[in-house]
Amino acid sequence: MARVYWHTSEDMREVVDKTVTLLLSAAVYLPGKPWEVHRDLYRRVYVEEGLRVLSTSGYLVTAQTDAYEQGVVFHKNYLVARLLVEAGYRLVDTKIWSRRRSDFFQVPFTQVLVWAPPGSVHTRVAAQRRCREYLEGVWSYPPVTRGRLNAWPPELCRLLVAAFTEPGDLVVDPFAGTAMVLGVAAGMGRRAVGYEVDESL
């Protein structure tokens, strides 16, 4: 079953401490807002609430697409990574999602970063055992366009859910958007919870 709560994930009060196996999140969409606003939101969601709800046997998977700004690359992945490392997360793996679509404003791939919370003993081996596709270094799927947003491809959602969870585990998407992650996770027998502030999505 999938459930969406229509409020910010800065307060995931519906989720019990240390019960989340996979906190899976694409970048938040805040058009026109400076990086400092994004950074503060990521700190409250990934660090403050994320470390509260994430099991020590769980994973945080983030996906950021760097952007071109005034002729140079604005490296959002580096900035998010620095925030997470300072909070005690460990980077256990990194993958490339080739979006197979040209975009004047974004580089043509997204970095998918796999994080283990403080106190975890994770390595990349467990995910490799669960999902053979995870072994590939580059995942090539076109994004799914829904309204004004690009949603996660269902194939990529299935791959990540298979790699990092078992049936019955709790998957949380703090920036649910069109809820593609939640639908796929629920269809695979996982419990799924999402947070979204824009009900029109």
Image (tube, grey):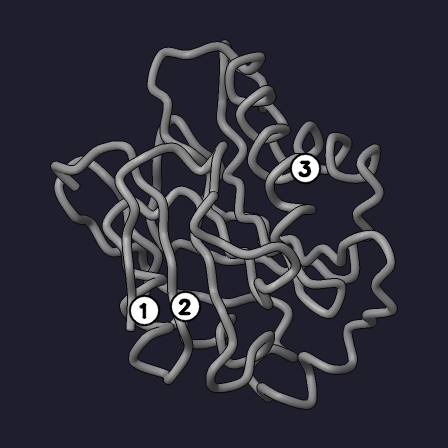
Few, some or many residues within 10 Å of mark 1 (<14, 14–19, 20+): some
> At numbered mark 1, what does the secondary structure look like: helix, strand or loop?
helix
- Amino acid under label 1? Pro
- Identity of the residue drawn at 57% across and 63% down: 20
Q: Which residue is mark 3?
A: 47
- Amino acid under label 2? Cys
Q: Which residue is mark 2?
A: 157
Residue 169 locus on image (x, y percent)? 51, 76
Q: CA distance from mark 2 to mark 1?
A: 5 Å
N-term-proximal mark, 2 vs 3: 3
> At numbered mark 3, what does the secondary structure look like: helix, strand or loop?
helix
- Amino acid under label 3? Val
* Rendered-image quadrant of the N terminus: bottom left
Residue 176 locus on image (x, y percent)? 34, 48
- Identity of the residue drawn at 61% across and 52% down: 53
N-term-proximal mark, 1 vs 3: 3
Does 10 sit above or below residue 123?
A: above
* In-front residue for pair 200/17: 17
Q: Which residue is mark 1?
A: 154
Q: CA distance from mark 1 to mark 3?
A: 27 Å
